[in-house]
Structure formats: structure tokens, C-alpha cells
Amino acid sequence: MNTQKISKNSVAGFSYTLKDSDGAILDQSDNPLEYLHGHKNIIQGLEKELEGLTIGDKKDVVVQPEDGYGLIHDDLIVAFPKTSFPPDLSLKVGMELETDTEQGPMVFVVREIRDQDILMDGNHPLAGEVLHFSVEIKTLRDATPEELDHGHVHSHGHHHH
Ligand code: ZN
């Protein structure tokens, strides 16, 4: 019998359903998502609630925006003059554009196309949302020394940097 529990430096895999406050499904995965526990690889409000669980455990976790994808910051909703976009780019509402900022690359979503400018939103799409997770722990093992060194999971031989 495996009595290992999720703790710092565990590699845990969980399936999940993510709903918003109205019960609409935002995201879902039956394939276990593996992460390295205690290294902020997943949102904090979820990670702290998975501590101590073991394989087969199911848990419903409600995560407030502050512990999830953050609150909506009005200063991340910015109007850019149309002239600052490449002329051959056909902009559509909902389109995501990556741009370099002083804080590194950021994704902005086109919110509104106006006469003179484009209203862009740099908030995470789930910012401001109360997140309702239903998770089931599917896999659990110790991290390898290399994973601990890198601070993230190396699953299925893939290695993204
Ligand atoms: Zn790595």
C-alpha cells in the first residue's frame, strides 16, 4: 500500500474540472496534469489545498481571485493608437497579441476596435474569477534531482525551457 502524501518536492498528477461561479465549465482534463509541489508551478490557492492528499483522493477547492489569476487591474486595459500596429495586421476582437514590456513578454487581448485606437487588455482571461476546481489525485512520486534543480516537472521525456 502506498501511503505517500503530497508534500514539498512531490510530483503529483491530478485530473480536474474547473468551473466559474455560475457552474459553467472553463477547463477540464481527464489526463493527469503533473506538477512539482511546493514550487509555485500551479496557482497558490489550489496548491495549498492539495497538500497532504494521496492517490485516489478527490477534493473540491474554491479559489478566490487573489489566490488564483489575480484581480482585474484597470491599468492593464490600455488604448494603443492604431498607428502602433503593423498595417497588414487585421485586428479582431478577442485576438491575442504578445508584446514585450519592461516586465517581459505579455499577452494582450483585443477588447475593442475604435476609430483612432485599439483597446487592449493585459489581464489574464481568468483574472477576477472565483475558481471552482474538482480534482482527483491520479499519480504521485518523488521528484528527480534534475526536476528539483530546475524547479519543474519533466514528464514524458519532453523538456520545455
Ligand atoms: Zn527543466
Image (cartoon, rainbow, N blue to C red):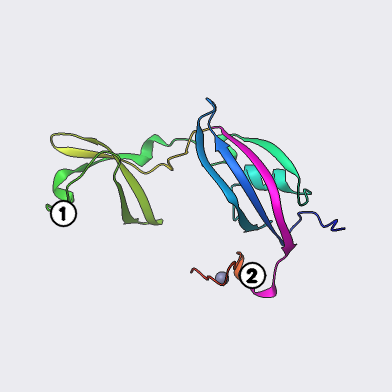
Q: Amino acid at mark 2?
A: Glu
Percent across and percent down for residue 79 are 25, 39
Near mark 2 (Cα within 10 A), the count class, few <14, some 14-19 or many ≥20, is: some
Which one is nearer the viewer's eye here, 90 or 139? 139
Q: Residue furthest right?
A: 1
Say if mark 1 contacts mark 2, CB within 8 Å: no
Pointer 2 residue Cβ closer than 8 Å to ligand 1: yes
User: Which residue is under mark 2?
Assistant: 147
Residue at the location (56% across, 72% down)? 157
What residue do we see at 74% from left, 63% from top?
141
Disc 1 versus disc 2: nearer the observer? 2
The label number, if any, that marks residue 86 in the structure image: 1
Residue 161, image x, y percentages: 48, 69
Q: Is residue 79 left or right of residue 83?
A: right
Residue 98: percent from left, percent from top:
32, 54
Q: Residue furthest top?
A: 22
Alpha carbon of mark 1 to alpha carbon of mark 2: how far?
Answer: 41 Å
Say what secondary structure mark 2 lies in: helix
- Disc 1 is placed on an element classified as loop
- The magenta span reads 130-149
Which of the marked residues, 1 or 2, is nearer the chain's N terminus?
1
Q: Residue at x 61, y 65 (%)?
A: 153
In magenta segment, residue 136: yes
**Residue at x 18%, y 43% (from the top left corner):** 81
- Most frequent secondary structure within the magenta stretch: strand
Q: Specify the quarter for ligand 1.
A: bottom right
Disc assigned to residue 159 = none
Residue 70 in view, yes or no: no
Q: Amino acid at mark 1?
A: Pro
Q: Which quadrant of the figure has residue 99?
A: bottom left
